[in-house]
Structures are given as structure tokens and as C-alpha cells.
Image (spheres, rainbow, N blue to C red):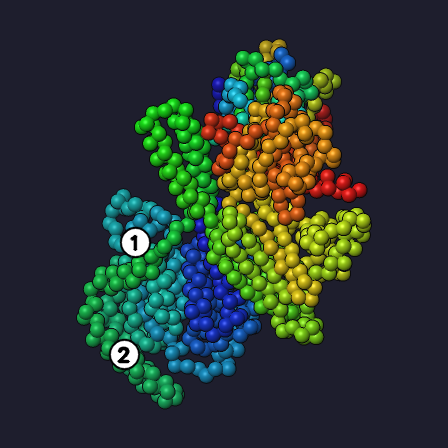
Amino acid sequence: MSNTETLTDHQRSYLTFTLNSELFALDVRQVIEILEVTKITSVPKAPGYMKGVINLRGKVLPLIDTRVKFELSPIEFTENTCIVVMEVVIDDENLQVGALVDSVQEVIEAKDSMLQPSPSIDASYPLEFIKGVLNVNEVFIMVLEITQVFSPEEFQAVKKSKNEGMAINPDTE
Amino acid sequence: MSISNKIYLEEASELLEKMEADIVSLEVCMDSRDVVQEIFRNMHTLKGNSSMFGLVNIVEFVHALETIYESVLNDKLEINSSILSISLTAIDHVKLMIEDPELSDANLKVNNEKLSLALTNILKEKSTSSEPVLDQVKKTYYVSFTPGRELLHNGTNPFFLLLELKNLGNSIIIPHQEEQDDLDKIDFTSCYASWEIIISTDKSINDIRDVFVFVEDESDIIIKKISDYNLVKIPKFYKTIKSEVKALTAQTIDIKWLKKITKDIIEQQGKLSTDNDNQKQHVVTDKSNQQEEATNVVSPFSTSTPAVHNDISSTKKNKKMISSVRVASDKLDNLLNIVSELVTTQASLSLFSENHYYAELETISENVEKLSRQLRDVAFGMTLIPIKGIIGRFRRMIFDTSKSLGKDVKFEVIGDDTELDKSIIEQITDPLMHIMRNSLDHGLELPEDRAKAGKPQAGTITFKSYYSGANVHIEISDDGRGLNKEAIQNKAIQKGIIDENVSLSDSEIYELIFSPGFSTAQKVTDVSGRGVGLDVVGKNISALRGDVKVKSVEGKGTTITIILPLTLSVIDGLLVKIENDFFVIPLSVIEKCNEIKYEKLLDTFNNTIIIDGEQIPFINLRDEFTRYASNPPEYAAMVIIKNEEFSLAICIDEIIGEYQAVLKPVGKHYQNQEFVSGATILGDGTIALVLDTNKLLEIKAKINQQMVI
């Protein structure tokens, strides 16, 4: 690895995981830790994708069922099911949130230039959730827009409208 | 922002707040010398701090302000309301200047000039009105300032000190430099310079010492009075010093020599001045000579310079004694988090020792329990601060507002040492401010109307706070016109807040003023009635798990009582169970508990049951939370909660027992969640959700309305 990379082409690390046997990736800088499934306390009258809360060493951590968020069937617990704890920044405040995923795979490295805009035709998932697609050895990995997927609902609405405005740019380039 | 800047900002705003409070309190009793002294002292500290950071504009401005109070202390000026109001404006201005010390905002700059002029005008008025006094004559001091080698390391800029000194009066500054032969040996981060200053000023020797207050520990500072006369202004003295003393050398002024030439020059000057000066002036010169003699006599006892220096620093050190420590609030929050975790861990230890009987373990566990309880009390006690801290702002607001409304207002405070959690105080300030503003604007009548109604011309607003159980009550009352019940009711019907046919109790009607979109004021004034109003207040208070009560007698006045929990982080609760999930109900709202056959709940009319001969509506949480995984128990437990007006029975599966819950937020993801106000972690690590009883009672209120219709 050399230092001659241009400023815009950073090498980044991504954590990959599966949902419905498809590969997804998260920027590792926002991932704090990976936990096994523990006792989940469900919160009554919450939106369906909010699975409940868990006790993370004395802290109360909200838990999102990522499958429901992606309009898939609710998660079924297997020995591979994991909780990815991450940090999202909303209004200058760091919020910790856990995401339930089918399994966690590995950490991969990729340059920014490898990140392609997501193919809008194949919109099997809500588009605003996907930051782009990585092509690693002919395997396509969808990189998630963490703030979009894992923020409380009312903060997403704001971001969504901003993103629609920005989405024009990649096409015109 | 660097840490030292942050400290400066924090201290400055604290000082300004103190000054503000003191100035407003002067309004009540204008001749309080202690208060003026305090104001002056704070201004001086602020000036000193600002000059440490080289904020020249602030220094100059505060200096002008300070001079006024100094004149007051010297009995040259008397406090009057115009001084007070300009001081308040000035303080507001300084607050802005702290944010923008370079005055980059043009408006600010214009304001700065205007206000500075206004301040100096006050002083000028004084000097024309009062006779020129003798002690205004400037005295001359010799100052030697030799900074320690490391002075520059902590970021102190000696030039700022010299600048501050220079601002005190007329001065001659002579720089010196340690002689260094070997350039290689010079450490460029050390300070090799020293200064000698001869300054003529009307300030006292203490004021000169104050300039060096932050560096005196590491520097050699000698301050001596050499004459009672303004020497620097005498051309001959100036010339002599300039020609005889060599700058930029290590050779310093010999004090004996200095005194000798001083004496000579004054004698000469004295002779000269008799020609054109009056007799009075002559006396001054003579007097100063006598005093000169006196200092000469004393000097043998204090000729050794280190002694003088020690003297100064020891008096200073006494002044610095402090009884409290400032701690960053996030450190405190951190401590509380850790203590909360400790309490949780301790609970699991207790649980473990209960389940496994070892005599020794039990003792240890009990000790840990005792200690952690004490630690918890101490830690939570630290976050409690007296409500006094925000009273100053209220006083200020009432002072300003009553002026602009043309109303005469007395503000009475009872129980300002009541302590509340700091986060509650932060969040309650604005709502309280709003309520008081409303009382001032809508509650109190104009002086002439009051006279007609046979009331004293000056209205009274009373702020009263006291403990009541685990709550703090804050009462704000006025003796104004009181609330008009009918007007409120009509308005509420007109705005569609209540239904025409609903009959409400008096207090229910009064509490309508806290509903959204409600404002009875005929017109919008700049004081209150901007549309967003008391409903925000109501919302803020219920967010703090607080409650508002309104009492009013038409023509006599209104009392608004706010009931707040002592602390936000620990509550006493009742631990209950529904299926396998635990919930906590705050003990403060529970009236009684009961048991009932589950099947009785199934065929009830309007969801009410009869408990102890009383018909009470109930909520079955199994239905509400759609928990049907297991069969309900044969006997369900009923917890009856109550606020002022309603009772409501909550049906759950089982009551576990009392539990002291450390409240934790459930996070923004559950912000819109209606039934849960927080969560707590039980001894075995399980999470129990804390029920929001206010919400449950609201649901009950809806049931009630349905029943009426």
C-alpha cells in the first residue's frame, strides 16, 4: 500500500453481514462491537422494526430488526444471529443502537473508487438505505447508509429529502 | 477552542451573572456599600481575566464601567437608577463582546462606542458637579517585574500585563534583559526579559498588585510608592529617568537614587508651583514630602526585596482560599452513570447472596449495599443545586419588564435555598420565566387600576419554593386581577379545545391555559402572548415528570404551583410483571393495590370495576400491550394510580414488590413511545420498563370523555 493515493480515493474497511442470504456492508468506523443475542425486552406499542431493548453493560440499548427495516420477514434466531452495535450521529449527538442481522461475515478493505452507485432498476430494497455497491471478486456487496437505516424515524424524513436532491449528481457525472 | 479560553468564558459569564444580580439588588437598596464593593470586585476580576487573554476591547469597556463603581466607593458618585440601568445595558453588551471580542460585527462596534461614551459621560457629570478633591492627585509608584524563566511556558504574555499596567495611569516602562554571552545556551522558550515601570496613577497599590495576580507566584514583583505626586507628568523627572537609566541592560534602578532625585525634583517643583498654583496645592506638596520622610523611616525594615515580595504574596494567598470546587458537568454526569451502574451491580450481588446462603457473603453484601447507598446519596446530592442561582435572572427580567410595562412591581422570594437537580433547574428556568412574564403582563394591573381597586400601587409577585415529600413545589403568585373563568372557557370552546357541553371543575378550567394554542390576551404585546405560550410550559413540565396546578380568585390574584420530582434519575417504584416482562410503576402516584378475579374484568360495563365500593375505570395492560402468549392468572393484581382528579386501575399479572429504580433513557428510537418513560436494570440484568403514568391517566381522561358523550 502506498501513500500515492489521491485524497479522494481512501482505502476503507467494511464489515460485511448477511440478510436473507445477501451480502451487506457497513463502514467499520461506525461499528462499536458485535454481540451474541442476549435477552431482549420488547417495548410495547413500538414500530415493528424496533425489536426491543437490551442491557449492554448497564446501558439500555435500543435494538432494530434490520430485516423488518428492509421489508423482509422478522428475524428468526439461529446460532449465527448477531447484534451489531453501532453509533449514529444525529443532531451532534452520538446515539448507540444495535442491529439484528442474520450473520456477521468478515472485514474487507475497499477503495472509495470501487464504490459504485446502486443500480436503481433493481430496487428490491428501499433505495435511500444503500450508499453504493462494492464489487469484490464478482460478488456484489451493498454498502449501507448507516444514518438512514438506523436513525429514529423522524430524523430520517429530513435526511431523505436532502438525499433526493443530491441523488442527481452521480448520474450527471 | 482551547481549554483556557473555555475556562475564561465560563468564568466571565458567571461573573457577569453575579454582577447582574447585584446591580438589580441595588435597585432595592441603593446605599448598600457591600454590594457595590462586590460589583466592583467582580468587574475588576473580569477585567483582569480579559486582559490575560489580550481582549483589549473588553478590558477598556469594563474599565470604564468599573471606574463608575470605583467612584461610588470613593463617595464621589451616588448610585441612581440611571447608573443602574446603563450598567445593565453595559453588562448585556459585555456578554455579546465575550462572544465577539474583536468587535467584528459592525453593530456591536457602534454600540460599543455609544456605550463607552455614555459611561464616560456619567463620570464627567460627576466631575463637573462635585468639587475637585485632593486625593485625586496621582501618586507615583516604582514597579519591578521580573518574570520567572518559565512564564512563557503556560502561555502568559507579559506584554498584556504591561498594557494593563499602562492603562492605570501615566507610566515610564524600562525594559531590561539578562546578559547572555553564549547564544547557544539561550533557551528560546524562556523569558530573559524584565521590566521596571514608574507609574503615576490614582489607583491604590493593591490595584497595581492585582495586575500581577496571576503571575506573582512565579515572578519577582516589587511595588513601592516613591511619591505622593504625579512625577511622570513632570518633564524633568521624565528626562532624568530616560537619560540616566539604560534600557535593555541588566542594570536596574537603584531605589535610593530614585528617591533622592524624586525628592530633589519635588522640591524644585514645589517652589515653581507656588508661583502659579494656589495655596492648597502647595499644602499637598508639603504633605507628600512629609510622607516621603515617613516611608524613608519605615524602609530600613523592609529594604530586602524578597521580604516585600513575600509580604505581597502571602496576603494574596489568603484571598485565594476557596470553599468550593468547579467541576465540569460532564464529569459529574459520568460519576452519576458509574454510581448508577454500581447500584445495579450491587443489586445483583444482593440477589446472589440471597440465593446462595453464605454467612460471610451476606455480611459483605450488606456492607456493599450500605456503602453504595451512601455513595449514591452523596453523588446525587452533588447534582442538586440551590434554586437561588436562577433567581437573579428572574429579578432582572422583572426589573426590565416592569419598566417597559409601566408597572410597579415588588418581587418577593421565599425559600431560595431549596435544592433541585441541576438538569431540572436548567429545564425549568424558561417555563418559570414565561409564567412570571405572564403574571407581569396579564396578571398585574396598571398602578391607576390598582388604586381604583383599592390595592397598593405596587403589585407583588411572589416566588416560593419548598420541599414536600419527594417533590419540590415552586409557587408563583401575583396579587393581580386573577383569571377570568368564563373568558377562559369561552375561548377554549371557540378554539375547539373543549366541547361546549362538557362541564369542568374550576381547576380544570384554569388548567386549560396550558393547552396548546390558547391565549386570552386581547392583543399581542412584546412581553408575552406571542402565540407559543403556556402550552410549551405545560409540555416542558410534564416532560420533567412534573405537574402544574392553578389557583385563582378573580380580583385577588393567581397562584401557579409547579410540582417537580427532586431528581430525574432515581425513582421509588413498584415492580410488577406481565407475562415474563417486568414493569415499574412510580410509587408516588400509587394509591393502593388490590386483587381481583381475572374473569371479572372480562364482562364489565365501560371498563370500570368496583373496588372498595368505588367505581374506578381500569386499563388491562395485557390488552393494551397485546400480550396473549400465556393464559392470564386466575387473580389479577390491580394497581390504583391517582392524580388530583382521576383514579385509574391498572391491571397486571403480578406485583413483585417495591423497587428503587435507577432511571435510564430508552433512547431516541423510542421517543414517540407513549407508555414508557424510561427503563431500569434489575439485579439479574433484566430490563424493566418504567410506565409513564401521566400517559395512562390521559388515556383514562379520554375514556371519561367518551362516557360523558
Q: Residue furthest top?
A: A138
Residue A30 on image: x %, y %:
54, 27
**Tag 2 residue:** B291
Q: Element at badge 2? A: helix
Residue B218 has which mark? 1
Q: Residue at x 75, y 56 (%)?
A: B488
Q: Residues within 10 Å of mark 2 (few under 14, many from 20)?
A: some
Q: Element at badge 1? A: loop
In this view of the protein, which residue sits in the foreground, B357 or B665?
A: B357
Question: Which chain does the residue under circle 2 lie in?
Answer: B
Image side of residue B272 versus residue B301, left or right: right
Residue B192 on image: x %, y %:
30, 52
Q: Tell me which corner region of the image, top left, top right, bottom left or bottom right, holds residue B217.
A: bottom left
In this view of the protein, which residue sits in the foreground, B166 or B573?
A: B573
Looking at numbered disc 1 in the image, what kind of residue is underneath it? Glu
Question: Which comes before the other along the chain, label 2 or label 1?
Answer: 1
Residue B514 on image: x %, y %:
68, 51
Q: Is residue A104 above or below residue B49?
A: above
Q: Tell me which corner region of the image, top left, top right, bottom left or bottom right, holds residue B349.
A: top left
